[in-house]
Structures are given as C-alpha cells and as structure tokens.
Amino acid sequence: MKSISTPVWTAEILELPLRYSWNISRNSSTVKYNLIVRIQIGNDLYYGEAAPNVRYGETIELLSAQWEHFLKAVDDRWWDDADQLHRVMEELNLAYALRFGIESAYVHARMDKDSTFFKQYTGLDLHTHAVATSYTIPILDPGKIQEFITSHDLTRFESLKIKTNSDNQEDMIKWTAKYYAGPLRIDANEAWTNPDDLLRNLEFCKKNRIEFIEQPFPSDYQEEYKYLKPISPMPVFADESVTHHPQLEEFQKLFHGINMKLMKAGSYREGAHILLNAKRLGFKTMVGCMVETTLGIRSGVWISGIADYVDLDGCFVIDNERFNLVSENRGRLFINSRKFFL
C-alpha cells in the first residue's frame, strides 16, 4: 500500500472529568488523563487513545515523555510494515497503553485505505453490530446503591458489575441485588488475600445471581488461585493478570476465564491473539476497558465479535465525552459511524 503523503504524528493530553467518583479497591479518582494520538495523512486525521493504568506504573507524565522518544525514533519507512512499527515500540520499551494508542491510530489509517486490513492483521472479523455491555457500580456506601441504580437508570442493562473489596463485598452485593433483578458480576481488583475467607463470602454471593468474580487475589498469588479454582462456587476470571503476552497455558490451572483489555494487550493484534488462544484453550472470554472515550470503546467493540462477555462501559463515567463515536440504547452499544477518521 502506498500512502498519498508522509504521515505526520501528533498527540494531546485529554483531561476527562468524571461524572462521579471512580472508587475501586486500590484507588479513587474524579478525573482521568488520557493521551490522544493522531496521524495526519493529507487532509485526513486518524486517532488512537492511550489510557494509562497506574496498576502497572503508567501515568500520563510517563506516556508524554515516551511519546517524545517515539517521535524521534519513528519514520515513514514502517508504513507498509506493521512489524517495523512494533519493533520500534518494543525497542523503546513503551508503556502498553501508549503502544495501543500508537498502533490503533496506525491501524485505523490502514483500514481506511484497505477494507480487508483488519482481518489480515488480527485474524478477526471487524465487529460492527450492536453489543450488550455490563455497567459497573463503583465502591459506594451500600445505602447509596439504590439511588445510584435509579439515577443512572441501570435496570436497562442486561448485567451489572460491582466493584468490591474484602470488607464490603457482601453488603455491596446484597444491596445491589435488592434493587436490580438481572445477573451480577464481581470485580474485586486483587482485594483478597485469604482464599478460605473468600470462599465463605462466595457461598453468600452465589445465592445472589453472581455470574463470576474477577481477580480476587493479587496476580502473584498463584498458589491461592490453584487452590480456589476447582472448589469455587462460581467461575474465576483473570483481569490484572492478563497483560501483554499472558501465559495462558499456565492460567488453565488458575482461572476459568480471562478479561482482555486492549490498553493492556498493547495492540489490536495482541488482543486478538489473546482472545483466540484463550478460546482454543477453553477459557470464557471478555473484552473489557479502562476509563476511555468512545474512541477507545469503539476499538473494544470492533474486536469483541468472539467474546463471551462485553464490559465496555468506560465512556459512561466521563462527563461530556467528546468523540461520540459510540451510542448506547437499552444497554447495547452502537457504532455511530463506520468512518475510520474523524
């Protein structure tokens, strides 16, 4: 493929005020900062999004500094060779969120010039149909859960995910189940350390329409996961454990399912590789997200065609989301435009 002109890279930090405090077991925030990457080719601009994750030492300051290193290293010779782009990012040891922001902008440009590129590049069909997503309730005072469900009209969603920690999990589930009649999912974000304490809690949880629990222990608690998996009353999904090139064969001893997030995979191609290999090994699969604009959420929809579950609600937390590339109706996500540029 020949480009019509030399690609020009730019980026900007996007401040994202949140509609409510985003509280999970390890931190809380009311604003996020993502990096928006752009490639200009002629008059067309192609965008990618990088949402840094402090769990892995990623900050907007780190991404901004690494972006400057990338600009000095990249040139237009990689345009017909995606592998060369990946080699540059690997040599620079870029944060995986930044790698995805860069790679996704590149992929969107290639897709616009060649409608078959996404399938050739990832091995997956581009998914453009509506998908049902869960909606996540952050850690709250349990007495405020009814108001949260009502004010955000959460009964329109087919499932809800509940952020918990080891102290409040039972109360969060009890009060959510009281005011929401659909299936529930638990996201513990590595909050538990004792598997027997967790098992006692899960016996309560299984009576309240819980589909599965995500990452109850820290990612390095492998013996605890080996102990839990065969006796857990519900499936256990990996989340924080699933990064770039996860050891899925080893995960068979630890988890029933995996949550793939493109910001942690570092590329569409690696995200697709994770999903396809996980399916081959018998895992249930989910496509998740960080707090992202609809630019990043659209990427998640595009790659979600083979996933068993979709958790692409990160744009709902943002106040006055700017791109409007994805809309929601009755808990289902719809891509607003098939154009790959903005």
Image (spheres, rainbow, N blue to C red):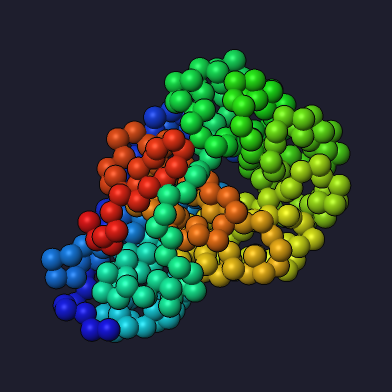
Q: Is residue 105 above or below residue 290?
A: below
Q: Is residue 50 left or right of residue 138?
A: left
Q: Is residue 155 left or right of residue 235?
A: left
Query: Taking the image as drawn, is residue 1 in sight?
Result: yes
Q: Quadrant of residue 241?
A: bottom right
Q: Is residue 6 left or right of residue 63?
A: left
The quarter of the image holding the C terminus is bottom left
Image location (x, y in percent) of residue 216: 71, 43
Compare residues 303 and 220 and report the one nearer the observer. Answer: 303
Q: Residue at x 48, y 69 (%)?
A: 124
Q: Quadrant of residue 85?
A: bottom left
Image location (x, y in percent) of residue 131: 47, 49
Q: Is residue 281 left or right of residue 5?
A: right
Q: Is residue 117 above or below residue 310?
A: below
Q: Is residue 103 above or below residue 34?
A: below
Q: Is residue 133 above or below residue 111?
A: above
In the rendered image, the residue lying farthest to the top is 143
The quarter of the image holding the N terminus is bottom left
Image location (x, y in percent) of residue 330: 44, 35
Q: Residue at x 82, y 45 (%)?
A: 232
Query: Taking the image as drawn, is residue 54 in sight?
Result: no
* Tally of numbered discs: 0
In the rendered image, the residue lying farthest to the left is 43
Q: Residue at x 53, y 46 (%)?
A: 311
Q: Quadrant of residue 276?
A: bottom right
Compare residues 4 and 49 and report the one nearer the observer. Answer: 4
Q: Residue at x 81, y 42 (%)?
A: 233
Image location (x, y in percent) of residue 334: 38, 47
